[in-house]
Structure formats: C-alpha cells, structure tokens
Amino acid sequence: MSKVVRVAVTGAAGRVSSSLIVRLASGEVFGPETKVVLQLLELPAALKNLEGAMYELQDCGFSTLKDVVITDDANVAFKDANWALLVGAAPRGPGEQRKDLIRKNGPIFVGQGRAIAKHAASDVRVLVVGNPCNTNCLIAYKNGRDVPADRWHAMTRLDHNRAVSALAAKAGTTNDAVTCMTIWGNHSNTQFPDFTNAKIGGKPATGVITDRAWLEGTFVPNTQERGKFIIDTTKVSSSFSAANGAIDHVKTLVRGTAAGDWTSAAIVSKGEYGVPAGLVFGYPCTSSGDGNWKVVEGLTFDEFGQKKFKTSLDELLQEQEVVKDLLPS
Ligand code: NAI
C-alpha cells in the first residue's frame, strides 16, 4: 500500500500558494510512491477561488494526488496533517509599518498554532512563510507547545536561493557551484547573507570574488532588498520563487543536504551562536532526510559579519517584544 502524506496549506488561494499546491500535488516533493492529500485553508471570502483551484488540481490528473479538502476552518485543515505550510497572512497595507503588520498578522498564528497542536499528526512539521515569518513562527510555536520545538520553522530558503544565484552570476559560474551559503537571522532586510563562510567551486567565496567592496556594498544589500526589488519591478511580491523556496525547504527535510554543504532555515534556537533560546532565528542547517534540522556549529565571523549578525538578532528581539502579549510563558 502506498504511503499517504497530508499537507495543510493556508492562504491556499493566494499567489504563493497557487504555485505551491500544484508542485506539492505533482509528486515532485514526496515521490511517485506517496499519495498526497492537500488540506487547503482560506478565509471565507476566498473559498470560491479555492474551489476553482481544487477543480484545476483535479484536472491535472496527477497520479500522486489522492484528495483535496477545502475549508475555512483551521481545525479541519490541520486534522492529521503531517506538514503544515502557513502561507496565509495579510499583506502590508499603504502607510503600514513592519510593527503594524506584526500586530495585524500575529493573532492569526495564535489560533493556527493551537489548532496544529490539537489536531495535527504526531509527526507534524510546520513551515511559516507568511510575513513577518520568523515572529509569526515564534507565535505559532509558543501557542502550540504540545508540538516539539524542533518542528517549527520559518522560511529563509528563498533568500538563500537568491544569494546563491547572485554569487554564481558574479563569479560567472552556475548555481550548483555555490555551497555553504547561510542566511543568518531574520527574513527581513536585516538578514545577513553570509558570503564569508560560503564557497564557490569548493573554494572560499572571498577568494573567488575578491572584490570585497562588491560583496559588502552590493551583494549584501541587494540580497536583503531583493523582495522589495521584485515588488518595485512587478508591483507584486515574489510568488513562484517563494513557492519554490518552500518546496526546497520541505524537499531538503525529506531527502537531506548534500555532504559538505548546508542550507538556510529559521528554527527555534537552542542558544546556538549566542542567540537567546526560543527565538526563531535563521541558521545554517543540515538534514539527513529524516525530517529534522541540525545547526552547523563552529562557523566564525569577521567584524563585518559580527555587526550584521547582531543587527538582525536585535531586530528579532524587538519583534518579540512587540508581540509579547501573544506569547504564553
Ligand atoms: P496573497 O495576498 O496573494 O495571498 C494570501 C492569502 O492568504 C489570501 O488568499 C488570503 O485570503 C489568505 N489569508 C489571509 N489571512 C488568512 C487566514 N487567517 N487564514 C487563511 N488564509 C488567510 O499573498 P501571497 O503573495 O501569496 O503571500 C503570502 C504571504 O507570504 C505574505 O505574508 C507574504 O509576505 C509572504 N511571503 C513570504 C516570503 C518568504 O520568503 N518568507 C516570500 C514571499 C511572500
């Protein structure tokens, strides 16, 4: 009998999820022998659009898609879910600050964290994509404490992929030559895309790209601001590249990282690299393909890296302060 994987996706009628659900259904992530049940959550106003998406998924005729559930009830969406991909969140409105967005979206993750803890499968893994994803993940985890801390993740994989692609282009090589990239800290414009520990063709990236001014003054800010650059160019935020980041995150947990390489994920800190335990922080991570992350220890920073790391850590501590009433102790 083939294995069945239940994947809950929130904000399922939105732009990111529209790409995500097709790739989840296709067998690309869990393989041809695994049947996927998609459990799609939306706000009531978007259910009609979601119904359309469900019909289109049926029309793809994927051999790996067993069923599609559409609902506006989180208790139904997370029932027995093995994976919960939390994409649904309100976008930042005109004139709104990051702090306003945190307050607007935070409460969504209180309810969803509780519903996951109550209804999901005992092996559930949660990936928060909806922004501000680190702090939304922190809220969901603190409200869903019955699920072990190491199951809660926020997405820095899109930033990771962007950073790899930018270094490869500058070095005149292909993306697969870039390894050991890390997005430290927050998925925001304070993140530190760490070129100092990255490699290109197995050599230190700083030895291949010797233009330090470009690395510090162009690569870092461009990676930090890439999301804004996409919005400025297209008037809407990243969609299929964001879905691709989520797919890569899950795939890596299912299949593992290559020997000698790692990837980026924001996870609940156990205090690694001096980050206060409990904060959802972007780290270099490996996986053996067993669904778990392991933080790569022992990396060092130069003065530039230390400064960038601290800026992102300070921002996450400030975000935690803004939502402290949503975090049960
Ligand atoms: P969108 O506006 O197209 O879709 C969001 C969907 O979420 C909407 O259909 C909305 O009805 C739904 N939604 C809102 N509140 C909900 C709730 N409480 N329960 C269920 N569904 C709910 O937005 P898009 O472009 O798909 O982006 C989704 C989120 O992903 C945004 O927060 C965006 O900032 C974030 N994002 C994160 C990235 C990352 O790298 N971590 C990259 C790109 C986007």
Image (cartoon, rainbow, N blue to C red):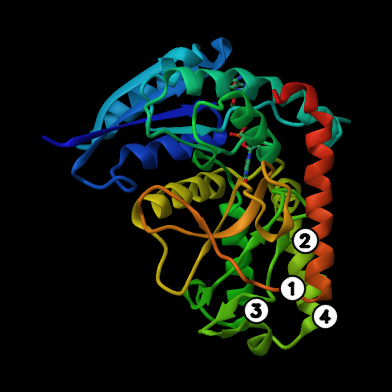
The image quarter in which residue 210 lies: bottom right
User: What residue is disc 4 on?
Assistant: 213
At x 57%, y 15%, the residue is 43
Mark 2: secondary structure: helix
Viewer-side residue, 63 vs 215: 215
Mark earlier in primary sequence (4, 2) = 4
Q: Residue extending furthest left?
A: 1
- The three-letter amino acid code for the residue at tag 2 is Phe
Mark 4: secondary structure: helix
- The three-letter amino acid code for the residue at tag 1 is Phe
* Disc number for residue 301: 1
In three-dimensional space, the C-alpha distance between marks 3 and 4, rounded to whole angstroms, equals 13 Å
Q: Is residue 70 above or below residue 133?
A: above
Assign the N terminus to one quadrant of the image: top left
Viewer-side residue, 167 vs 51: 167
The image quarter in which residue 308 lies: bottom right
Image location of residue 195, percent across then percent down? 68, 73
Mark earlier in primary sequence (3, 4) = 3
In three-dimensional space, the C-alpha distance between marks 3 and 1, rounded to whole angstroms, equals 22 Å
In three-dimensional space, the C-alpha distance between marks 2 and 1, rounded to whole angstroms, equals 9 Å
User: What residue is disc 3 on?
Assistant: 170
